[in-house]
Image (tube, coloured by chain):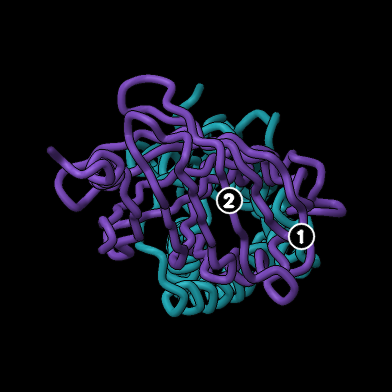
Chain colours: A cyan, B purple
């Protein structure tokens, strides 16, 4: 079954979750490496990989949002306290917002920098703003701030998943793992 | 009877009426170049340059002389990061080679309104023979010279060291010009 049910995630939801998770980790590594590398052809190549991965994440996130809205989400265990429900909901909303806002702010940086760019050297990406050095600097600051926020929310997200598994001993983490039959 | 000197004088005056000296009208003139950056076109412009075309007679351009000077330091590629990078010794080396020149004294008509100027380009301390094709449109005291050509950047030592491999920054650069001239005198 592809669709989510009351107590389990379908295959598309798991695919989106783990693909985006992996890409975000790769993306953070690529971003720091590219930004800190000395100016050289390799730096430019690293940036093409970083920007391309960002656009891939943006497309996946939009598809993922559409899938999530078109589908029910599995329920939290009935004994979950209200504050946990709100916290879970808020952190998920934040993760979605940040995972979309980060590539968008990167797109603004690239456009404001006036650097021509094709996604994976194939698909030319149009500029969304005119070249402007001050806007470029501002967008870089926003991009970095969003990254810090993403890392904080991710830490909460991962800690919460581990807490559900090891402390509360419920199926929250297990039911997102790939290749497992959902509980009946 | 006419004095004997009137014939050469008339001839001289008629040639002068046809052959003219032209100088640049900077405001509408454009000198652009298109490099490639990660397989994307990366356009740039030299904001300051001068063009002089002396003794140009459209039907018989052999006596003409074309002189172009380009202020390399006026290069603008619409990106602060790129503009900073191209100043350096591996690229244009603004400090040592702020100016490029092209001088041609071999100008031929290849078809109606189409010419080829063969001369020498001095760029970043390297002199190379270069053929510059151009079209010529003249009306009254104004004329437009337009053309484009390819320049191989490595011939002039532009983009050296690890940049000499053309995979990130392409080796060929398209140079385009649309130059407005005014008749002198």
Q: In which quadrant will I find the C terminus of chain A? A: top right
Q: Is residue A53 visible?
A: yes
From the image, tell me which residue sits under label 2: B103
**Spot occupied by residue B147 in the image (x, y as percentages of width and height):** 42, 37
From the image, tell me which residue sits under label 1: B125
In the figure, A99 relative to B55: above or below? Answer: below
In the figure, B6 relative to A112: above or below? Answer: above
Residues under numbered marks 1 and 2 in contact, where contact means CB atoms less than 8 Å apart:
no
Closer to the camera in the image, B12 or B74: B12
SS of the residue at dot 1? loop
Q: Residue A89 vs residue B113: left or right?
A: right
Instruction: Tell me which chain the residue with mark 1 is part of.
Output: B
Q: Residue at x 51, y 56 (%)?
A: B68
Binning the other alpha carbons within 10 Å of mark 1 as few (below 14), some (14 to 19) or many (20 upward) gives few
Closer to the camera in the image, B82 or B152: B152
In the picture, the disc for residue A136 is none
């Amino acid at each position: 079954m592809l669709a989510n049910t009351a107590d389990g995630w379908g295959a598309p939801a798991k695919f989106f979750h783990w693909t985006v998770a992996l890409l975000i980790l790769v993306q953070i590594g690529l971003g720091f490496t590219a930004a800190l590398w000395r100016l050289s052809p390799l730096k430019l190549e690293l940036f093409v990989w970083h920007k391309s991965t960002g656009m891939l994440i943006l497309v996946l996130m939009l598809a993922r949002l559409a899938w999530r809205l078109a589908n029910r989400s599995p329920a939290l265990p009935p004994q979950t306290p209200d504050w946990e429900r709100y916290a879970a909901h808020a952190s998920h909303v934040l993760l979605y917002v940040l995972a979309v806002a980060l590539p968008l702010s990167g797109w603004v940086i690239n456009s404001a920098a006036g650097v021509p760019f094709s996604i994976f050297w194939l698909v030319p990406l149009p500029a969304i703003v005119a070249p402007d050095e001050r806007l470029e600097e501002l967008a870089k600051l926003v991009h970095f701030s969003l990254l810090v926020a993403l890392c904080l929310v991710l830490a909460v997200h991962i800690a919460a998943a581990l807490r559900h598994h090891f402390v509360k001993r419920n199926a929250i983490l297990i039911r997102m793992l790939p290749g497992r039959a959902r509980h009946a | 009877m006419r004095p004997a000197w009137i014939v050469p004088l008339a001839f001289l005056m008629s040639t002068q009426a046809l052959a003219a000296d032209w100088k640049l009208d900077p405001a509408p003139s454009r000198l652009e170049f298109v490099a490639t950056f990660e397989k994307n076109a990366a356009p740039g412009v030299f904001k300051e340059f001068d063009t002089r075309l002396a003794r140009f007679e459209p039907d018989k351009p052999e006596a003409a002389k074309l002189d172009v000077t380009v202020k390399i330091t006026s290069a603008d590629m619409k990106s602060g990061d790129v503009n900073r990078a191209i100043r350096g010794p591996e690229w244009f080396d603004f400090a040592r080679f702020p100016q490029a020149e092209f001088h041609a004294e071999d100008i031929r008509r290849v078809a109606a309104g189409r010419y080829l100027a063969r001369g020498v380009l001095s760029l970043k301390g390297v002199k190379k023979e270069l053929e510059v094709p151009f079209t010529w449109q003249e009306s009254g005291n104004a004329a437009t010279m337009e053309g484009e050509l390819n320049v191989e950047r490595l011939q002039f030592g532009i983009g050296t060291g690890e940049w000499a491999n053309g995979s990130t920054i392409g080796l060929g650069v398209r140079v385009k010009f649309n130059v407005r001239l005014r008749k002198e005198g």
